Image: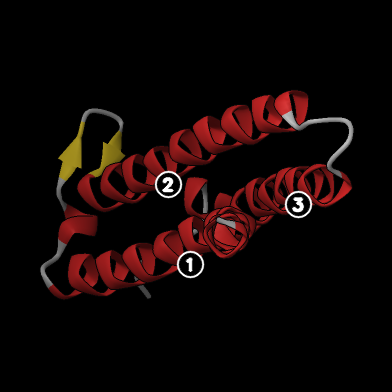
């Protein structure tokens, strides 16, 4: 039982960074694909297809992270007061998830305005 909880705690601890890394891989792959296929030159309303795809993928990852923040917040609230290790992992997982949100915003915000293809 303790081994199962330890593994679950470690998975939750890195979950936000896994979502961030998924965004990293997806955005850079789509950037390369979009540039190769000329998505920057195709418009969807006021923005290019390239920018629309990148923003959509970015927002999807931010939505997943928002759900993870909510879940880890609830987990900190439900952690038993007498189990210090559970409380520690719950708080640490919440902090790591919040950091993941911040890094995802800061790292990928340039897709909102910078030229995607040179």
Considering every residue shown, the one lying at the far front of the view is 1
Is residue 115 visible in the rendered image? The answer is no
Residue at disc 2, secondary structure: helix
Compared with 43, 19 (above or below) is below
| Residue drawn where x is 21% and y is 46% of the image | 49
Q: Work out which quarter of the rendered image holds the N terminus and state it.
A: bottom right
Q: Earlier in the sequence, mark 3 or mark 2?
A: 2
Name the spot of residue 59 as percent of width and height, x first.
43, 38
Q: Earlier in the sequence, mark 2 or mark 1?
A: 1
In the picture, the disc for residue 89 is 3
In the image shown, does 112 or 46 lie closer to the viewer? 112
Report crowding for label 2: few under 14, some 14 to 19, many 20 or more residues within 10 A (C-alpha).
many
Compared with 80, 115 (above or below) is below
Q: Nearer the viewer, mark 2 or mark 1?
A: 1
In the image shown, does 62 or 11 lie closer to the viewer? 11
Mark 1 vs mark 3, CA separation in Å: 21 Å
Q: Quadrant of residue 14?
A: bottom right
Name the spot of residue 64 as percent of width and height, x first.
44, 38
Q: Quadrant of residue 43?
A: top left
Residue at disc 1, secondary structure: helix
> Which residue in the protein does label 1 denote?
21
Name the spot of residue 83 as percent of width and height, x first.
83, 42
| Residue drawn where x is 46% and y is 33% of the image | 63
| Residue drawn where x is 66% and y is 48% of the image | 97
Report crowding for label 1: few under 14, some 14 to 19, many 20 or more residues within 10 A (C-alpha).
some
Mark 3 vs mark 2, CA separation in Å: 27 Å
> Which residue in the protein does label 2 denote?
58
The reply, left or right, for residue 51 in relation to residue 89 is left
């Amino acid at each position: 039982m303790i081994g199962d909880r330890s593994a679950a705690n470690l998975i939750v601890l890195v979950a936000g960074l896994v979502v961030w890394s998924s965004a990293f891989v997806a955005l850079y792959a789509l950037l390369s694909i979009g540039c190769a296929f000329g998505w920057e030159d195709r418009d969807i309303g006021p923005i290019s297809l390239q920018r629309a795809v990148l923003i959509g993928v970015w927002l999807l990852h931010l939505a997943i992270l928002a759900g993870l923040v909510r879940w880890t917040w609830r987990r900190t609230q439900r952690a038993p007061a007498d189990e210090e290790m559970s409380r520690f992992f719950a708080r640490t997982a919440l902090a790591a998830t919040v950091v993941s949100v911040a890094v995802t915003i800061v790292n990928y915000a340039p897709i909102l305005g910078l030229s995607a293809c040179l």
